[in-house]
Image: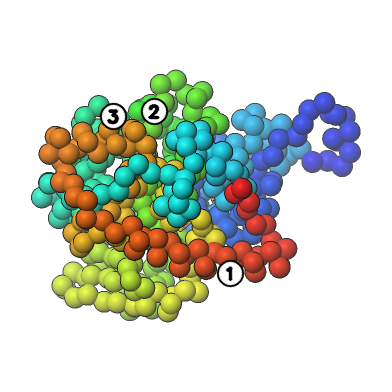
């Protein structure tokens, strides 16, 4: 803002916006590329690597008030906000367990659809729940993240079974799942969205502040456990430079039990300890507080259930209704054989790393988000 300009507008409180977002989050290295800031403001754009340059934000050109109230700052999952306050709004209750978050019940779930199981990362619960959401009256379309042969990711909204099933499987690359949320919601107000914890938290913060203004908007949010995720160029570096493989040859990837596993077209399995590419882990993921996507309606993850099953944590009544409908209509089978202690152990490792990185940031005078 031009020097002294604020003296002429004493009654208008300057809203926070892109300048603060850039300073606190983007330039301080903790943007996870979730896309929330760009979901409703077309002045923010995500690059392939998830950095967020503003093209012509009016707040960077001396405007006192952003016409959408600095939503880019207020929806970011990595700025300070009250987690308990958001839980009150979303669930009407606060969590008893810091890592698992507010939840009603947890299960192990497996899809009953052979096509889904063939493509799925684990038990295909996420894909089958999306199919049930679309076919059983919860949503009109689902936002899924697909990939091309080189594992470039893209996200789109669809009600077509082939496209929803086509999105199955985990991609360890930042995806633009909620980037087009505003545009999608204006066309399809009842959406099911699957995403990582930062994407789900960003969406909830938008829901609280902005979605009430979108007539008939209704979201079903399916979260994913998430220890870390990479900008595409870093994923490529890990797979091509450190493992010596070609992206085009990769058929599946999984990070579990401290190792990255990569399957290739020749039927071979390759592995590398996660610590050997720890230097490529984004700082946003190191300081992330949300391993289990605690603001979802339902969260899905690998850890905590047998191979070929998905651990499913149901948090809201909407989530429970969806799970029950999917079970009754034979999309999924459901078991109680779930080990939440294993989930908490993994979340605990993440918490220790987080505490260490945050304390270093504090010493360096960098922005440290406060979620109390
Ligand atoms: C980046 C990432 C890290 C993860 N880390 C862990 C972990 O540390 N521990 C653990 O237990 N589980 C982790 N998971 C979750 C796990 O890999 C499975 O996604 C989950 O168990 C659901 O399996 P499923 O067979 O039910 O899902 P599927 O039926 O295979 O469906 C997966 C869904 O995930 C969506 N998706 C895929 N990649 C992305 C992406 N990059 N961003 C947003 N959405 C995406 C797809 O659109 C699809 O709808 C991670 C997932 C992701 C995306
Ligand atoms: S116009 Fe408002 S919401 Fe958009 S980038 Fe600027 S401050 Fe953020
Ligand atoms: S909202 Fe998401 S994409 Fe935007 S600055 Fe925050 S973390 Fe980055
Ligand atoms: S670890 Fe956290 S910040 Fe990183 S992608 Fe996953 S949910 Fe987002």
Which residue was labeled with disc 1?
356
Instruction: Say which residue label 3 marks.
Output: 138
Q: What is the crowding at mark 1: few (fewer than 14 residues within 10 Å), some, or many (at least 20)?
A: few
Vertical position of residue 29 compared to residue 12: above or below: below
The mark tally for this picture is 3
Which residue lies under the disc numbered 2? Answer: 218
From the viewer's perspective, tell me whether residue 300 is left or right of residue 265.
Answer: right
Q: Residue at x 25, y 39 (%)?
A: 323
Residue 270 position within the rendered picture, expressed as x and y whole percent measured from the top left: 26, 76
Which of pointers 2 and 1 indicates the residue nearer the eye?
1
Q: CA distance from mark 3 to mark 2?
A: 9 Å
**Residue at the far left in the pictured view:** 114
- The answer to which of 366 and 345 lies nearer the viewer is 345
Q: Could one spot residue 150 in this view of the protein?
A: no
Residue extending furthest toward the top: 215
In the rendering, at what x and y percent does residue 127 appear? 24, 45
Q: Earlier in the sequence, mark 2 or mark 1?
A: 2
Q: Nearer the viewer, residue 324 or 363?
A: 324
Secondary structure category for the residue under label 2: strand
Please state the horizontal and vertical placement of residue 233, each as a whole percent of the image. Answer: 44, 65
Q: Seen in the image, is 111 located left or right of residue 169?
A: left
Kind of element beneath mark 1? helix
Q: Quick one: label 3 or label 2, which is nearer the N terminus?
A: 3
User: Which residue is the extreme one toward the front?
Assistant: 96
């Amino acid at each position: 803002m031009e020097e002294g300009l604020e003296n002429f507008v004493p009654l208008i409180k300057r809203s926070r916006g892109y300048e603060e977002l850039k300073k606190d989050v983007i330039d301080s290295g903790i943007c996870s590329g979730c896309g929330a800031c760009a979901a409703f403001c077309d002045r923010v754009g995500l690059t392939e690597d998830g950095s967020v340059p503003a093209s012509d934000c009016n707040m960077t050109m001396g405007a006192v008030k952003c016409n959408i109230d600095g939503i880019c700052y207020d929806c970011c999952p990595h700025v300070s906000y009250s987690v308990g306050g958001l839980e009150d709004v979303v669930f009407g209750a606060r969590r008893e367990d810091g890592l698992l978050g507010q939840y009603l019940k947890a299960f192990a779930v497996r899809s009953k659809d052979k096509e889904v199981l063939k493509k799925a990362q684990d038990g295909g619960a996420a894909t089958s729940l999306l199919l049930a959401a679309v076919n059983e009256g919860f949503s009109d379309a689902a936002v899924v993240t697909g990939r091309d042969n080189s594992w470039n990711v893209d996200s789109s909204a669809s009600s077509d079974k082939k496209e929803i099933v086509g999105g199955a499987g985990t991609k360890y690359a930042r995806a633009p799942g909620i980037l087009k949320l505003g545009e999608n919601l204006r066309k399809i107000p009842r959406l099911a969205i699957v995403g990582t914890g930062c994407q789900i938290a960003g969406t909830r913060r938008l829901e609280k502040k902005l979605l009430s203004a979108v007539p008939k908007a209704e979201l079903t949010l399916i979260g994913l456990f998430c220890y870390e995720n990479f900008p595409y160029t870093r994923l490529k570096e890990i797979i091509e430079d450190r493992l010596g493989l070609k992206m085009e040859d990769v058929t599946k990837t999984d990070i579990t039990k401290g190792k990255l596993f990569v399957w290739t077209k020749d039927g071979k399995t390759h592995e590398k300890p996660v610590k050997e590419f720890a230097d490529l882990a984004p700082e946003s993921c190191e300081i992330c507080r949300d391993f289990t996507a605690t603001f979802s309606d339902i969260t899905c993850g690998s850890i905590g259930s047998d191979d070929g099953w998905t651990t499913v944590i149901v948090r809201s009544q909407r989530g429970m209704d969806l799970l029950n409908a999917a079970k009754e209509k034979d999309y999924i089978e459901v078991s109680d054989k779930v080990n939440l202690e294993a989930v908490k152990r993994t979340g605990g490792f993440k918490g220790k790393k987080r505490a260490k990185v945050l304390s270093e940031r504090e010493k360096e005078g960098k922005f440290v988000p406060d979620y109390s």
